[in-house]
Image (cartoon, rainbow, N blue to C red):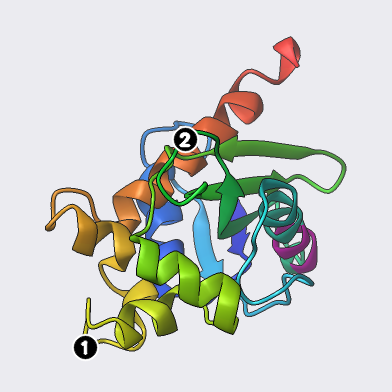
Amino acid sequence: MRIKVGSQNDVKVGAVREAIRDYNFLSNAEVSGLEVSSEISEQPKSLDETIRGAMNRARNAFQNCDYSFGLEDGLMKVPNTKTDYMNVCACAIYDGQNYHVGLSSAFEYPYDVTRLVFDEGLDINQAFHRVGLTENPKVGSAEGAIGILTHGRLLRKEYTKQAITMALIHVENSEKY
């Protein structure tokens, strides 16, 4: 069995490799990353855009494989939060006919980060670097913003695996959906 991940980000590809180990029908799959377009903005600013980006990545990565996985982090409007927005990771698994979508838990960025994303069009990597929360300009390929904000208690790979596990509910229980 072959699985393609619509990204060459080691965190995303590694999250898929680790998440599928718990599934007998996927545990022996060959997993590889493929750089594809999400066909959305660099920094998604709505839940709809985030899910569309994950679905586009999955569809665009579906090449010579049984399943393709698209992963996309983005902001979504959430009432009663300090900044009005939270980050969520979306996973879309594509089997050539159907999409299976799952989401991670959500968390809020500091006000200054959210402001830079909306006011100056920065992505999260750039905003975290600009406000001095990291010296790594590609924090999304490392511990992620979640790793910084939780002081290492939850790293991006584990956070991403949440969305993958939620999407795999549909694949593993397809007869129910």
Amino acid on which the number 1 mark rests in the picture: Glu
Q: Position of residue 83 (x, y in %)?
A: 45, 52
Picture disc at residue 165: 2
Please tell me how crowded label 1 is: few (under 14), some (14-19), or many (20+) other residues with Cα within 10 Å.
few
Q: Residue at x 35, y 48 (%)?
A: 159
Q: Is residue 36 left or right of residue 72?
A: right
Q: Residue furthest top?
A: 176
Q: Position of residue 32 (x, y in %)?
A: 53, 69
Residue 145 vs residue 149: left or right?
right
Q: Is residue 128 left or right of residue 115?
A: left
Residue 140 sits in quarter: bottom left
Count all numbered tags in the image, as a single digit. Answer: 2
> Most extreme residue toward the right, as rendered?
97
- Going from N to C along the chain, the mark reached first, 2 or 1, is 1
- Magenta stretch bounds: 56-60
Q: Position of residue 131 (x, y in %)?
A: 29, 81
- Residue behind mark 1: 135
Does residue 162 show up magenta in the picture? no
Type of amino acid at the residue the image marks with label 2 = Thr
> Disc 1 on helix, strand or loop?
loop
Residue 89 vertical placement versus 128 (above, below): above
What predominant SS class does the magenta segment belong to? helix
| In front: label 2 or label 1 | 1
